[in-house]
């Protein structure tokens, strides 16, 4: 049994750290968490594939993305998540704040599925009420 007891949604920045093998603490934390407790959003999957298509090694990075994404549950943008995302966006814009369009969708998906969002982007995601976030990335 893992010492971590939450269900997590990996943000794109954290997934990229794992794919690049750059941040050992993130990789170790991911390895210590039960696979069924970790998910990716369909938005993060799309962002990862976009990055692969824009890379120098398109076919190799597409294959890497397929393998990585295929090992996790992929959470869709459901009606509930879409409504939550819209509410987040409206609330933030009313308050004179914004977050990126992909980030607002990821936040809505995390809230809809009651997930802790694992991200290094606490500046933006920290503005979202009721969104629990954790940062597994340790800067060297």
Image (cartoon, rainbow, N blue to C red):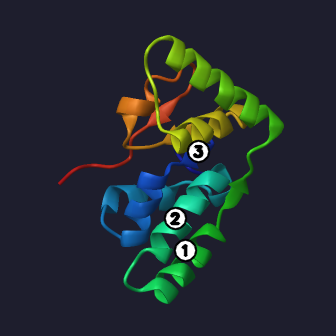
Q: Nearer the viewer, mark 3 or mark 2?
A: 2
Residue at 43 percent of width and 43 percent of height: 119
Q: Are marks 3 and 2 in contact (CB under 8 Å)?
A: no
Separation (CA) of disc 3 from disc 2? 18 Å
Q: Earlier in the sequence, mark 2 or mark 1?
A: 2
Label 3 secondary element: strand
Separation (CA) of disc 1 from disc 3? 19 Å
> Residue 116 placed where, x, y %?
56, 37
- Vertically, is 18 above or below 105? below
Q: Are marks 2 and 1 in contact (CB under 8 Å)?
A: yes
Q: Residue furthest top?
A: 95
Residue at 39 percent of width and 56 percent of height: 26
Residue of label 1: 65
- Vertically, is 119 above or below 25? above
Residue at 61 percent of width and 76 percent of height: 66
Can residue 103 be seen by looking at this rendering? yes
Q: Quadrant of residue 97?
A: top left
> Residue 89 placed where, x, y %?
58, 25
Residue of label 2: 48
Q: Quadrant of the C terminus?
A: bottom left
Q: Residues within 10 Å of mark 3 (few under 14, many from 20)?
A: many
Q: Residues within 10 Å of mark 2 (few under 14, many from 20)?
A: many
Can residue 41 be seen by looking at this rendering? no
Viewer-proximal residue, 68 or 32? 68
């Amino acid at each position: 049994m893992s010492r971590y007891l939450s269900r997590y949604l990996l943000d794109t920045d954290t997934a990229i750290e794992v794919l690049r093998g750059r941040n050992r603490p993130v990789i170790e934390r991911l390895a210590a968490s039960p696979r069924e407790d970790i998910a990716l959003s369909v938005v993060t999957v799309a962002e990862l594939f976009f990055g692969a298509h824009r890379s120098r090694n398109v076919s190799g990075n597409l294959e890497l993305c397929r393998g990585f994404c295929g090992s996790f549950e992929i959470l869709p943008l459901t009606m509930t998540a879409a409504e939550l995302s819209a509410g987040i966006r409206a609330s933030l814009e009313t308050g004179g704040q914004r977050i990126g369009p992909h980030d607002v969708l990821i936040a809505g998906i995390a809230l809809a599925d009651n997930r802790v969002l694992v991200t290094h982007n606490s500046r933006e995601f920290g503005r979202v009420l009721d969104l629990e976030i954790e940062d597994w990335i340790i800067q060297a």
